Amino acid sequence: MESEAQAVHIDDIEPVEVALGIVRRRLIATEGARGWLIDFAPGTQWPEVDVHEKEERYYVLSGEVIEGETRYAAGTYVVFAAGSRHQPRTETGARMLGISLMAN
């Protein structure tokens, strides 16, 4: 019997530089959602405002992520509603694990 689960080890995914000091690993995607892991070097900001047709969620694994004036420390789970906009940045460096729901 074949397993219905898909799995991948983070270290087996090729990192891609999104901007200077920001590296993303795209995780397994399905028709309903896609996952990603992003590492931010200290003092970096996502290169553009991120706009979402559907919800996006992330968990701050390490460091601190800043959205506007709000700071999210390691251990924080953040959910953005459909239609929201944000542009994460960090002063300390950060690692986040996220899930983006896909538009129908």
Image (cartoon, rainbow, N blue to C red):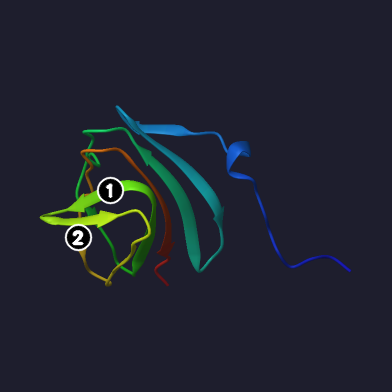
Q: Secondary structure at mark 1?
A: strand
Q: Quadrant of residue 47?
A: top left
**Marks 2 and 1, how far apart in space?**
19 Å
Q: Residue at x 25, y 42 (%)?
A: 46
On residue 44, which mark appears?
A: none
Image coords of residue 17 (percent x, y)? 39, 31
Name the mark nearer the viewer: 2 or 1. 1
Of the numbered discs in the image, which one, if any, rests on residue 85?
2
Relative to 34, 40 lies left or right: left
User: Nearer the N terminus, badge 2 or badge 1?
Assistant: 1
Q: Quadrant of residue 9?
A: top right
Percent of width and height locating residue 37: 45, 47
Q: Residues within 10 Å of mark 2 (few under 14, many from 20)?
A: few
Residue where numbered disc 1 is placed: 64
- Picture quarter with the C terminus: bottom left
Image position of 45 with respect to 19: above or below: below
Q: Is residue 90 left or right of residue 7?
A: left
